[in-house]
Image: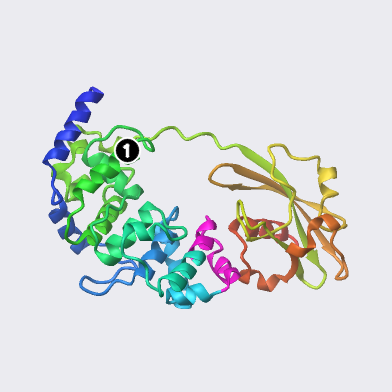
Amino acid sequence: MPALLKERMIEQQLELATPLFGAEALLAWYDCERRDLPWRVTRGRRVDPYRVWLSEVMLQQTVVKAAVPFYEKFVKRWPTVRKLANAQRDEIMAAWAGLGYYSRARNMHECAQVVSREHNGRFPRSEEDLRKLPGIGPYTAAAIAAIAYDIPATVVDGNVERVIARLFAVTDPIPPAKPKLKKLAARLTPPTRPGDFAQAMMDLGATVCTPKRPSCMMCPLKGECAARAEGIEASLPMRLPRPIRPVRRGIAFVTLREDGKLLLRRRPERGLLAAMMEVPSTEWNERLEDEDEAVRLAPVRADWWPVPQIVTHVFTHFKLELLVYRAVVPVETTLNIWADGARCRWVQRRDLDNEALPSLMRKLIAHALKDAE
């Protein structure tokens, strides 16, 4: 179908669409089929904005199944925004370890402090004011406004984008099509129960209008879906080809002391994995440094033993390959001057679970120790 003709068809659909377009059927479906998630409350009960915010932060770039145990742990330990604000950052980072995208945890702590200090422990109601808070962008602001305060805000995540793209047969690729999809979604947001509508759209995308093999016969909007009418639902949304991730390489040094302690170093306050604890390593570059030269940059002087096999880890924008060297050193060992001792400390291996160690670092340590028992 010519692009101009399809654009005109979408415009006509928008002209005919009202905020109740499919909303009643979708909400009726949601009332019966909604997912049972720990941050949701039964209809008619008061919604806690803190729990909505906490769940939405955790769900950024994270699937529901992975987020649930972290959410439950956080709510049990810090049940209010004030308690989270008063927590030590290292405690929060340690509790977050394993969830990934660690800037979310730093922004979350800062946001909790701002809400506690400047808003008397209450999240603002408007999207505009919510977006002024650290770490809260357009999506999260809309989600809090709609779900916590029942304000008619348009909530568009990846699931909603997929539903909208299929509902209107939008063949423009993502990400360029995102503004169009949000405009279409905004026309569908009803004035009543906007929070339930937002969650219904998300549930529909997660459980029925799935990326592969959508269950169209179970969809409450099947009669209004343009993509299904054209038989192209499985191919939408279209996406631009992802760029090839570059590869970076380095050498990590797992240093064990004879008293059972392991050397960790705090990463810089800004940048990738900021302020997290790490296994000291060389810089991560496109080319691996000469191994003999790299060992001279180790944090301590020792007999370094190369651990067989490379450890790989995939970040959003690059793939990392690390060689791992291991050494056992006496208790009186001193750090080399270039190891930046102010950021280093020795930690008992049994206490590693309490450290803010990202999954990469835990992977490195496990790899180095797997045959060292």
Is residue 210 highlighted in magenta?
A: no
Q: Quadrant of residue 163?
A: top left
Position of 186 relative to 242 (above/below):
below
In depth, the one of 310 and 159 nearer the eye is: 159
The C terminus lies in quadrant: bottom right
Where does the image place residue 81, in percent across and percent down from the top left?
43, 73
At 72% from the left edge and 70% from the top edge, which residue is drawn?
Answer: 347
Is residue 98 highlighted in magenta?
A: yes
The stretch of residues the image draws in magenta is: 88-108
- In the rendered structure, the answer to whether residue 180 lies left or right of residue 118 reads left
At 82% from the left edge and 50% from the top edge, which residue is drawn?
Answer: 297
Give the residue type at disc 1.
Answer: Pro
Where does the image place residue 357, in percent across and percent down from the top left?
62, 62
Q: Is the magenta stretch mostly helix, strand or loop?
A: helix
Where does the image place residue 235, in percent across and percent down from the top left?
31, 35
The N terminus lies in quadrant: top left
Q: Name the residue under label 1.
A: 237
- In the rendered structure, the answer to whether residue 173 lies left or right of residue 298 reads left
At 74% from the left edge and 56% from the top edge, which residue is drawn?
Answer: 280
Position of 362 relative to 12 (above/below):
below
At 47% from the left edge and 35% from the top edge, which residue is drawn?
Answer: 242
- In the rendered structure, the answer to whether residue 104 lies left or right of residue 63 reads right
Question: Is residue 194 in view?
Answer: yes
Q: Quadrant of residue 106?
A: bottom right
Residue ranking furthest to the front: 118
